Amino acid sequence: MTYERAYHTIYDQYKELSYVVFTGLLKLTDVQNEFKYINNKTEKEKKEIKRELYIKVLNRFNTLDDKKLTNITFILPNSEIFLDMKQPLTKTSMNENKRAFNFVKNNKEDMDSFEVKDEDTGFNFLYSIKVENEVVGFLNITFSEQAITSSLMKQYYVLTNFIIKDDNFSKEYLKNTKEYKAAHFDGFLHNTNILTELRDVSRKDILVLKPSRSMSIKIYKEAMENKANSIFINKDNIIVTTIPIMNKLRNKQEAFLAILSKEDGLSNLEKTYKLILLLLIFLYLSILLALYFLISRSIAEKNSLNKIIKKDKQLLEQMKLAQMGEMIGNIAHQWRQPLSTISTAASGLKMKHEFDMLEKNDIPEFTDTIVTNTKYLSETIDTFRDFIKEEKETKEIVIQERIDETLKIVRASLENSHIKLINNIDYENPIKVELVAEELAQVLINILNNAKDVILQRKIEDGTITIALIKTNKNFKITIEDNAKGIEKDVLPKIFDPYFTTKHQFHGTGLGLYMSKIIVEKHLFGQLEVENTKKGAKFTITIPL
């Protein structure tokens, strides 16, 4: 079912977002070391740790409000809630859901599920906080059910509601809360925030249509059968799709997602049914003639298909050639100067010979020049071959050396575009770290090429790109800054979104910066950020040592 796949796609997006939030908070707070020795702390010290943790997390917590993030909780190994971002002043208390923590601890894998509970209902993503494979605590990230409904309504032309069973809420909570109200039938609730959003949507033609009571009873009954269902309401041309929402730990359905979509095409099905029967009779009587035309058409289609396959192969080859052409273009930039030097040396040697002007030191001098530049050409091939080789492994490297190897690939391209590369890297204090060097190089090339393209696109005179390397106690930072006047304010928040590009459609796919962010944050366990400076845009890659 289309909407069931859409639901799982959106759910996976939020699961990925929760992981990014989790890894970001670990780097931001250093909560691992705090929790490792928490049992040795006094109550006063614990209170101070909690206060500092809250201050560090607050900004990240608030910025994710538009993603429908409702809570972040830090939990100790004994299931004691250390910090509840939604209720930070609450004293530490025991979390009743020990089953989830035991699952994460025993199975050594993260847990995600939908849970219904007072003050904290939603999609929970539970991660273990580890120090040297020892679980020292947990981090629970909760997104409201509105995260799913909002995404569905924004991405598809539908209305979406979330119906929750009330048996896991306490009676006292339901009596005092304004977040949930009774649904059409006893035992079920609506999220009032979702209802408010529903009133503002544009599909008024669906909004005014309400199923009959008998149809509603059928929808609710089938929706709680632990499987996705679709019901077509013929008189209104409406399809109601229901998707079960499960609590994975209890293996119990806690709620269901209801999706209303207008399907005018299905309303004509009944009208055309008799016509189809008549056509079938006609086809039956004309079977011999039809077979003749089918055979003739089959031969024609086969020829046409062969042409299409041939064309597709040509397009595939063109795409491969385009990718190869880009790499050859970079090699050409590198080779242009040494080839010119070799040509000049050979011509000079020949001219001196023809005019009988050769001196004793001329031949060694000219041949040394040719040999030196030929060696450079060979090294260039090695550099590009090492970069594009497929095998990628984690190994100890010197960051300064890897940056230099990467700059060799783009330096000639920058020089030929009249862009000055300012290298502010400290080479006196080598930084050694274990990571996949090829992936770091890929990110650097993406950012450098983006900066070059923007400078050329905006026709910046005296274009410059400045690269610097900074080391701290816990990480190192690579900054790349251009002087192309920065990124527009409305574009800046979208710069890392997939398929977002400001380039012409034939020059950009919108995946470069998105993939760079994925590589830095998921593969290198770091952070990729961008900001505008007085000169232009500044990208900062932060990677733990």
Image (cartoon, rainbow, N blue to C red):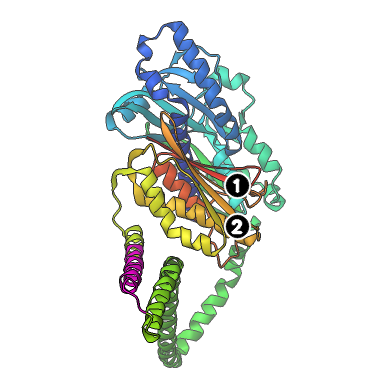
Q: Is residue 30 left or right of residue 64?
A: left
- Expressed as whole percent of the image width and height from the top left, the position of residue 99 reads 35, 25
Instruction: Tell me the element at label 2.
Output: helix
Q: 476 and 491: which one is in front?
A: 476
- How would you classify the magenta stretch by its main secondary structure? helix
Location of residue 368 by image quarter: bottom left
Look at the image and give the residue range highlighted in magenta.
Answer: 358-380
Q: Is residue 282 above or below residue 49?
A: below
What kind of residue is marked 2?
Val
Residue shown at 46% from the left, 50% from the top? 516
Q: Dot 2: within a 10 Å radius of its alpha carbon, few (fewer than 14), some, or many (20 or more) residues?
A: many
Q: Dot 1: within a 10 Å radius of its alpha carbon, few (fewer than 14), some, or many (20 or more) residues?
A: many
User: Circle 2 is placed at which residue position?
Assistant: 454
Q: Is residue 465 left or right of residue 380?
A: right
Whether pointer 2 and pointer 1 mark residues with C-beta atoms closer than 8 Å, the reply is yes
Residue shown at 47% from the left, 90% from the top? 286
Q: Where is the C terminus found, in terms of image quarters?
A: top left
Residue shown at 55% from the left, 65% from the top? 507
Q: Is residue 372 on the magenta stretch?
A: yes
Q: First in sequence: mark 2 or mark 1? A: 2
Q: CA distance from mark 2 to mark 1?
A: 10 Å
Q: Is residue 443 on the magenta stretch?
A: no
User: Circle 1 is placed at which residue position?
Assistant: 537
Q: Is residue 60 above or below residue 342?
A: above
